[in-house]
Image: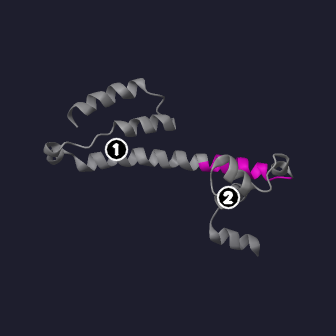
Amino acid sequence: MGEGNSDLQVASTQGPPAWTLDALAHAARQLEPPAPHEKKAVLRPEAAHLVDSLLARVARGRGALDVAIGGALARLSEGDRVLQLGYSSIGDYARERLGMAGRTAQAMAYTACTGDGSASAARRRRG
């Protein structure tokens, strides 16, 4: 990790703000595995903590994006909005415009409407 640390410090001050997903991707690209002769000196618990915190922020960001997309798809499914755009369903819209599986889009919209995507919650709502 020798020279990589100084590059990381310089790059992190020049990159996008720390809260954006682009900043997280930028930080992840800066991580370099240690050279074979440096592996014994790696502080594994500290390194694990740093990588874990980076991955946790990425996961939370991805979750927030999924919730936002689900909310937009749920609003699009109200009335005949999706038909006005020329699609027969949310699934068709998602496949053609968003490049995601139709069932995934339906599940995201459903979760956004109910606030809970668990199977037990779905059974409670059905009766």
Could you tell me the amino acid type at mark 2? Answer: Gly
Query: For residue 67: magenta?
Result: yes
Give the Cα separation between the discs numbered 2 and 1.
36 Å
Q: Residue at x 22, y 30 (%)?
A: 3
Residue 113's image quarter?
Answer: bottom right
Q: Residue at x 61, y 50 (%)?
A: 66
Query: For residue 29: magenta?
Result: no
Compared to residue 78, the image places residue 34 above or below, namely above
Q: Are marks 2 and 1 in contact (CB under 8 Å)?
A: no
Q: Which residue is tagged 2?
A: 102
The image's mark for residue 2 is none
Q: How dense is the environment of label 1, judged by Cα within 10 Å: few (below 14), some, or many (20 and up)?
A: few
Q: Which residue is tagged 1?
A: 50
Q: As drawn, is 116 to the left or to the right of 56?
A: right
Residue interval drawn in magenta: 66-79
Q: Residue at x 69, y 50 (%)?
A: 96
